[in-house]
Amino acid sequence: MLPTTAGRSSYTVALANEQATERLVLDIAAALEPGDLITLSGDLGAGKTTFARAMIRTLAGDPNIPVPSPTFTLIQSYDLPRFPVVHADLYRLEGPGELAELGFEDLPKNAVVLLEWPDRAAGFLPPDRLDVAFTLSPLSGPEHRNARITGYGGFAARAERIAAIRRFLDATVFAQAERQRIQGDASTRSYERLQAGEQHAILMNAPRRPDGPPVRDGKPYSAIAHLAEDIVPFVAMANGLRHFGFSAPQIYEAELPDGLLILEDLGSEPVVGGTPPAPIEERYAAAIDTLAALHRLKLPATLRVAPNVSHTLPPYDIDAYLIEAELLLDWYLPRRGVEATDAMRTDYVASWRDALAVAVEAAPTWVLRDFHSPNLIWLPERQGIARVGLLDFQDAMMGPPAYDVASLLQDARVDVPEPMEIALLGRYVRQRLESEATFDPAAFAQVYATVAAQRASKILGIFARLDRRDGKPQYLRHIPRVWSYLQRSLAHPALAALKGWYGAHVPAPEAGQQTAAGGTGTTQG
C-alpha cells in the first residue's frame, strides 16, 4: 500500500448526544463513493464502533440490520445497495506486517472500508482517505464526544465540502433533516432528498466546475462547449422557466459561492414505464407540447438572478457544435480500434461545418440541452405544460429549437420507436404552424436531422469516454441505441456527404450488441 501524505483538511464537530453522531454519519455517508477508506481513531470506548455501526445501517437503509463488532473476526463485509462495505478492526494486530494475512489486498475495489485502530497500519495507509478521530469529553457529559474530521490527499477537498454542506443546512429549516442520496447520472453534481417533518426538498450539491486542460486556442473543452461553471445559470433558468409557467423547481435556499441549493421536490414519477423502460406516449406527447409552448415564446438571452447578478445564455455557435462532434473521433473511434488521421479529422470537421450552417443560422431560442427522460418528471396533478417537471438546464444556450426536440425523441437511454418519433414530430410541427404562419416544416426537418446526428455523435464519444476515462462501463449498453438513432438522422438527403464519411470510417458497435430490429441494445435504463 502507499505511504501517508501530508496534504489534509480538518475540522472538529462536537457530538453532544447520539442524535449528533447520527447527523455526522449522514453528512459523511452522503459524500462517500465506491473505494473510499474511512479510518476511525480514538481510545477504547470513544465511539468508533458506534459510528461504524450507524454508518452501515445508514448505507443499508435499515436501522435494524445486525452489525456485530469485528474485534474478534477482524473483518465483517456487507453487500449494500450503493456499494459493498467492509468493517475492519485492527486492535488485535501485533503490527502492520499482519495486514496481508487479513486479505486486505483481496477486498473488492469498489468497497467502502471502515477501519478501526488505523494506527496498527501506520505507514501502510493510502494517501487519499478520511479520518474520524473521537475523543471523550467527560466534563461536558457522559455521552459527549468530540470528533476531528480530517481529509487526506484527494479527500481533503471532499472533507471541506462535507463541512460546507453542514453549515448550509444548519442555516435552514432542514438542519435536522433526514437525508437520502438520490442515484445520480454522469455529472459531477449530486442530489439528496431532505425530509424534516412534513417538509421535504432536494439538496443540490454542485461544486464549481474546474477548468480542464486547454484543448484549442488556449481554452478548455468546457469553455468551448459552453458548459456551466457554477450554479448561477441553473438559478437563472429555473426562475426564467417558472416565470413563463413551466414546472422548474422552486429554489428555497441558495448559497451561490458554494454551489448549494435547496429545491422544490418535484417527486420521482418518470415519463417512461415498464421493464425495460419505454416511453409512455401520453407523457411524451405532453413533453412535446411543453417544447412547442416554449418555442412559441419570445425569450430573453439575459436573465436576472439576484441584485447585481445576471446570466447571459451563450450562443450555440459552430465551435461548440464541432468540439462536441469531435468527441466521436477522440473516444468512440479509438474504442473501435480506429485512430483518426489528420486528413480524416479535416474532412470530418469540414463536412460538419457545412452541415451545421442551417442550425447556427436558425432563429434562436432557449435550448435546455438535456431535455430527455432522466430529466423529466410527470406531475399529473398539474395542468397543461406544467404537467412536465424540468430538472436539468444549467447548460442552456441560445440555439435552434430542433435540438431539444431531438434530445427527447432520440432519447439515448430508452428506445423511442421510429413511428412514435415521426408522430410526435408531426404533433410538434402542427402546433408551431397553428401559431406561426412563417414556420417552415421542411427547414425544421433539416435542422432536426442535423442536430440529432451531431448529438448522437457527441453521445457516442461521451459514453465511450465514461467507460475508458471514468471507469463507468454501464453507459456502453446505450451505444447501440444511439448508433441506431444516428443512422436514422444521417438518412436525411442534406446529410449525404456526412453519411458517406461515416460509412467509410466509423465502425458499427461491437458484434452482439445489436438486435435484429432497430439495432438497439437489449439492456436499457
Image (tube, grey):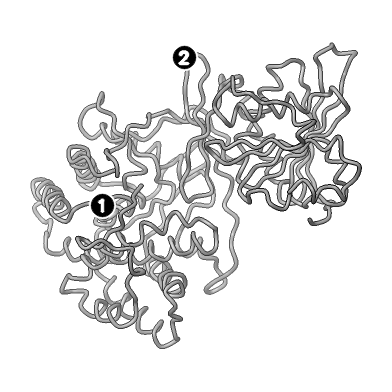
Which amino acid type is marked by label 2?
Glu
Residue drawn at 25 percent across, 32 percent down: 387
What is the crowding at mark 2: few (fewer than 14 residues within 10 Å), some, or many (at least 20)? few
State the image coordinates of residue 110 (x, y, percent, origin top left): 61, 48
140 vs 377, left or right, is right
Answer yes or no: do the residues labelled 1 and 2 have beta carbons within 8 Å?
no
Reading the image, the residue beneath label 1 is 415
Spatial CA distance of label 1 from label 2 is 38 Å
Name the disc covering residue 198, or none.
2
347 vs 17, left or right, is left
Is 44 located above or below residue 341 in the figure? above
Indicate the secondary structure of the residue bearing disc 1: loop
Name the disc covering residue 366, or none.
none
Nearer to us in this view, 23 or 258: 23
Indicate the secondary structure of the residue bearing disc 2: loop
Which quadrant does the N terminus fall into? Answer: bottom right
Q: Which residue of the protein is positioned furthest toward the top in this rendering?
A: 141
State the image coordinates of residue 346 (x, y, percent, origin top left): 39, 84
